[in-house]
Image (spheres, grey):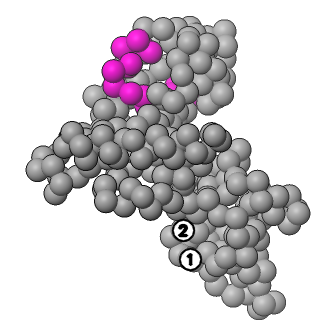
Amino acid sequence: MTEEELLRGRFCDLAEKAYGENRYVFSDFLNMAEISLLKSIKEISYMPVTLFGGVEGAERCMARFGSEALFGYTQDFPIACILAEPIAPKFSDTLTHRDFLGAILNAGIERSVIGDIIVTENQAYIFCKDELADYIAENLQRAKHTALKTSRPDRLPQALYRTEERTVQVASLRPDCLVAKVWNLSREDANSLFFTGKVFVNGKELQNNSATIQSNDLISVRGYGRFRFLSASPTRKGKLNAAIQYYV
């Protein structure tokens, strides 16, 4: 049995458990490929599924099986946020997403219990399963050579994900054109991302590199980042100026 078949079976089991026990059931944090697979399973269409990662715009999300209409009550996602930051900022290394993630994994914590890690000004907002938040906070003591302190913030910054408006000039609104231009890739390299299952539009895997992108579509590419297509206007030379919102 393949890994995809095992995961498909796991999703079906979670849906059946929620239905049979008449209660909400939650998955671990899912990556883009896992979310895309979940959305494709027609066998669980009887069970409402909601995705959330602890903050609006999160890429890694938990799946909640069930709904208020079905069960007669609502239940929040069991997601906590930990703020990790240098004890002595003046003497700290420059820390990246990879540094914080590496420190978490080195503490023996599985990737599936960790959601997005958002790094701003050398500090990280780490979304995780609520039941493991205290353990993670106690064991996340160092990243690279920098000693860390952790806390549970009372509120999140209003704009946790930083974005910037950009304009790229493309021949058409084909997704391979946009991906190539945004990340300065050759068309051949951009197309290979589609054929290897690394491109997602609105959370669904897209292998059709000639599909038409619509306004407000969110394009994510594993290993590169993501951007939202906003609009396009023609140039005098017959090309298009595409306005995008790029996640920094």
Residues under labels 2 and 1: Cα distance? 6 Å
Q: Position of residue 243 (x, y in %)?
A: 61, 71
Q: Quadrant of the N terminus?
A: top right
Locate residue 147 relative to residue 73 in the image: left or right: right
Question: In this figure, which residue is indicated by the disc labeled 1?
Answer: 214
Q: Tag 2: Cα neighbours inside 10 Å, few (<14), some, or many (≥20)?
A: some
Residue type highlighted by circle 1:
Gln
Q: Is residue 126 visible?
A: no
Furthest-front residue in this view: 1
Q: Position of residue 234 (x, y in %)?
A: 69, 87
Mark 1 secondary-structure assignment: loop
Question: In this figure, which residue is indicated by the disc labeled 2?
Answer: 217
Furthest-left residue in this view: 72
Does residue 130 show up magenta in the picture? yes
Q: Position of residue 112 (x, y in %)?
A: 51, 30
Locate residue 119 relative to residue 181 in the image: left or right: left
Q: Residue at x 86, y 66 (%)?
A: 187
Q: Residue at x 66, y 28 (%)?
A: 98
Q: Nearer the viewer, residue 97 or 113?
A: 113
Residue stretch rendered in magenta on the structure: 120-137
- Residues marked 2 and 1 touching at CB (< 8 Å): yes
Q: Is residue 35 above or below residue 213?
A: above
Mark 2 secondary-structure assignment: loop
